[in-house]
């Protein structure tokens, strides 16, 4: 499967922790999708915004968005868009627990494509 250039760019930005940019890039791509693909990209967008909020000290916003990101990622097939969904999902769940426990550091996922 050839990945859409906006998906590749958005994932690269996410993995570089350029969360605002990843959100902007992926939102353009998200508008072209439907079904599980749309849900997964929405989850990644929400996670990106959550980590952006966390980095700016807004743990309430981060918690809300991570909760939504987890629910969306849980609803899709584990190979949607040929992305390794389970490692991403497990890490955002850990991030959510950290934010809920008011930890000052949060583990952030690196999103990978299935081979």
Image (cartoon, rainbow, N blue to C red):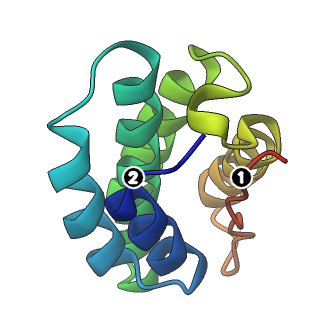
Residue depicted at 56% across the width and 35% down the height: 81
**Percent position (x, y) of residue 67?**
49, 35
Mark-to-mark CA distance, 1 and 2: 12 Å
Q: Is residue 8 left or right of 38 when viewed as pictured?
A: right
- Location of the N terminus by quadrant is top right
Q: Is residue 101 left or right of 3 when viewed as pictured?
A: right
Which residue is nearer to you in this view: 72 or 41? Answer: 41
Which residue is nearer to you in this view: 52 or 103? Answer: 52
**Percent position (x, y) of residue 77?**
66, 16
The crowd level at tag 1 (other Cα within 10 Å; few <14, some 14-19, many 20+) is: some
From the viewer's perspective, is the residue at label 1 or at label 2 nearer?
2
The crowd level at tag 2 (other Cα within 10 Å; few <14, some 14-19, many 20+) is: few
**Percent position (x, y) of residue 51?**
47, 69
**Percent position (x, y) of residue 48?**
42, 63
- Residue 54 makes an appearance in the image: no
Position above or below: 49 against 66: below
Secondary element type, mark 1: loop
Give the residue pinned by disc 1.
113
Which residue is nearer to you in this view: 41 or 19? Answer: 41
Secondary element type, mark 2: loop
Residue depicted at 38% across the width and 46% down the height: 65
Q: Of the numbered discs in the image, which one, if any, rests on residue 4?
A: 2
Q: Is residue 23 left or right of 27 when viewed as pictured?
A: right
């Amino acid at each position: 499967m050839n990945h859409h250039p906006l998906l590749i760019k958005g994932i690269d930005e996410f993995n570089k922790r350029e969360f605002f940019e990843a959100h902007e890039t992926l939102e353009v791509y998200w508008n072209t999708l439907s079904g599980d693909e749309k849900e997964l990209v929405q989850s990644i967008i929400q996670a990106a915004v959550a980590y952006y909020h966390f980095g700016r000290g807004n743990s309430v916003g981060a918690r809300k968005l991570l909760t939504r990101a987890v629910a969306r990622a849980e609803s899709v097939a584990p190979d949607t868009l040929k992305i390794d969904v389970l490692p991403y999902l497990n890490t955002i769940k850990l991030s959510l627990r950290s934010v809920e426990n008011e930890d000052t550091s949060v583990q952030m996922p690196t999103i990978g494509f299935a081979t």
